[in-house]
Image (cartoon, rainbow, N blue to C red):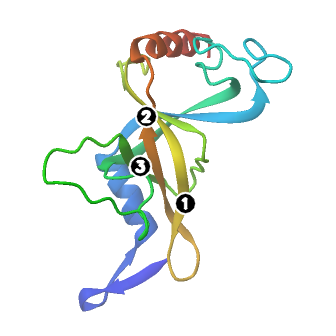
Amino acid sequence: MRMKINNNVDINLREEFNTLTDDYGYYALLIRKSEMNCPICSSQEGQQYSGVCPSCLGIGRRIKIERIKLLGQQAAQVIATPNNSVYTNVGDIYSDAKAYYVKYDINPHVGDFIYEVSFDKFDRVVNLHGCYKIEYSEPYRMDNGRSEYKVCSTHRENTNITIKEGMLKELMKRL
């Protein structure tokens, strides 16, 4: 969509966002979670799974890993709504919430994960910095309804990063 701003300057929000992401974004892994149970660690009922399964990264479902470029920022809470306000005394507040912005054609879903990682010059995972579970995913649309970009609200998973990093490196070797 093209829109006019100051002095009738014509911009395309999707193109501007894509340029911003290409120039200033960083790579991460989008871990897509399937509805199918992991065949290695889940029981027939899907109730039991191993938190250290190298096939599904301890999620208990089949997964698909995608390398994506995104923008991220710390957030005060996972979903900002008018009735979700929290008043606190003045002081330091730690928030495990993070907002991610991705290009319009990436379709993250609630329940998927974003893994912030470092890559070496051969695009191999070197370090895992954080695991974030997507709690909310919504396209940002302009007046004509076209999706310009997507926003994901996440929270940091309480997990042993060292164990998860080892599982991720092992899994990436097999892909």
* Residue furthest left as drawn: 90
Give the label on residue 100, or none.
Answer: 3
- Residue closest to the eye, 98 or 24: 98
- Residue closest to the eye, 58 or 89: 89
**Mark 2 and mark 3 in contact (Cβ < 8 Å)?**
yes
Q: Which residue is mark 1?
A: 138
Q: Earlier in the sequence, mark 3 or mark 2?
A: 2
Q: Earlier in the sequence, mark 3 or mark 1?
A: 3
* Residue furthest right as drawn: 44
Query: At x 45% / y 45%, what residue is drawn?
Result: 154
Residue 42 place in picture, x, y as percent: 76, 17
Residue 136 place in picture, x, y as percent: 53, 53
- Asked if residue 149 lies left or right of residue 64, the reply is left
Mark 1 Cα within 10 Å, few/some/many (few <14, many 20+)? some
Residue 21 place in picture, x, y as percent: 37, 51
Q: Nearer the viewer, mark 2 or mark 1?
A: 1
- Distance, label 3 to label 2, CA atoms, is 11 Å
Query: At x 75% / y 11%, what residue is drawn?
Result: 40
- Distance, label 2 to label 1, CA atoms, is 19 Å
Give the label on residue 28, or none.
Answer: 2
Query: At x 31% / y 43%, what residue is drawn?
Result: 95
- Asked if residue 156 lies left or right of residue 109, the reply is left
Q: Kindly state the secondary structure of the residue where label 1 is placed.
A: strand
Q: Is residue 117 depicted above or below 20 in this figure?
A: above
Q: Earlier in the sequence, mark 2 or mark 1?
A: 2
